[in-house]
Image (spheres, rainbow, N blue to C red):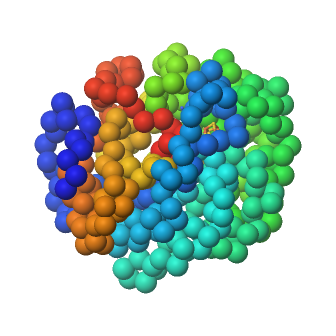
Amino acid sequence: MVSTPLYIRATPTPDVRSQPGADTRNRQLRDLRISVTDRCNFRCVYCMPKEIFGKDFTFLPRAELLTFEEIARIARIAVAHGVEKIRLTGGEPLLRKGLEELVRMLAALKTPDGGDIDIALTTNAAALIAKAQPLREAGLKRVTVSLDSLDEATFKAMNEVDFPVAKVLQGIEAAHDVGLGPIKINMVVKRGRNDQEIVAMARHFKGSPYILRFIEFMDVGTTNGWKMAEVVPSAEVISRINAELPLEEVAPNYPGETTVRWRYRDGSGEIGVISSVTQSFCHSCTRVRISTEGQLYTCLFATQGHNLRALMRGGCSDQQLSTEMVGIWQERTDHYSELRTAMTQQPSSTGGKKIEMSYIGG
Ligand code: SAM
Ligand code: SF4
Ligand code: SF4
């Protein structure tokens, strides 16, 4: 195995696995997230702050990106070992040229019992009007669209590139029209920036075919200046909405779902909250991530990945790649959010520089 250490080794945890193939905390591999580019046409304040990702910022050269063939090879092996859902992300995945071709390659994969893979995409929707149809034809099943406000000034102050709300809404509609649903809308809530928009967003999407989800501002990477004071806990989000639009909690769709679901008492749909800061869900985390340049990460907050690109470009066989990937999963100990919670919600020390969201995807 490539001997890149797993992070958070300083916190030994008991090995509680009881199922074959599980990691040390008895979690199975189910989801694969692939970042297809580190570039983005937005500069969201919580992800790629323009002061850091300015015009002098050096993005990865093309040769360092995984090719579609390399991505599909990793995905095929991951699917053979339990992955049922693949999400394409970034950076902004729609900026990767020919993305439909990758979707076509991934859509051809089957689970060991012959089932289809659920292929989804997270996007800022800037290019969705043009891309929805070809992506759907290539085999994409669903999209999640990020939208942090309906108020023009607030949204522009979040994306920092003057991108208008209306174009995102048109992108969402285009995706809906071609059947890329159910569409989820992600709103990252940052106190003092867009939290005044919570109820307006809920009102707008209530009764629509779209499921709005509120995401707590997370301490991913090291450049977004995260402070606990700027996190709006999901409990507060729910209480603010409930005061005007009464809600009740709904049972999860499946065990370990990261989104907690709530529905409007008047029957006009549901919303979700993702409380990665205030209510960690590490105990049920079944995700592995592949960064743009082919590092495998077993946690969003990792400081170190496992270089699959080097293995592949060094000529490893499928069997070697498979042994490597399975070994990494089975050694996995990650539980960063639990540690952060235990430290009263200070960023937990991982003994290194955490990977940026734009390299690893959400
Ligand atoms: N560019 C695409 C987009 O924005 O949808 C895909 C990549 S983006 C990194 C994936 C998701 O991560 C988005 O929904 C984004 O809002 C979320 N995200 C980025 N930085 C975050 C942070 N610091 N805390 C919480 N969510 C974050
Ligand atoms: Fe770009 Fe998505 Fe990050 Fe915003 S959240 S800067 S759209 S990668
Ligand atoms: Fe999974 Fe890491 Fe997030 Fe915990 S902190 S839920 S282990 S990605």
Q: In this view, does 194 lie above or below 96?
A: above
Where residue 40 sits, quadrant-wise, is top right
Q: Is residue 143 above or below residue 228?
A: below
Q: Which residue is drawn at 55% across and 51% down?
A: 62
- Splitting the image into four quadrants, where does ligand 2 fall? top right
Does residue 329 show up?
Answer: yes
Residue 15: x %, y % from top left:
14, 48
Residue 172: x %, y % from top left:
77, 54
Q: Residue at x 67, y 29 (%)?
A: 55
Q: Is residue 53 above or below residue 143?
A: above
Q: Which residue is drawn at 76% across and 68% down?
A: 133
Q: Which residue is drawn at 63% across and 47% down?
A: 92
Residue 189: x %, y % from top left:
62, 30
Q: In which quarter of the image is the N terminus?
A: bottom left
**Foreground of the two, 277 or 334:** 334
Q: In this view, does 75 lie above or below 256?
A: below
Where residue 101 sits, quadrant-wise, is bottom right
Would you say 4 lies left or right of 51 here?
left
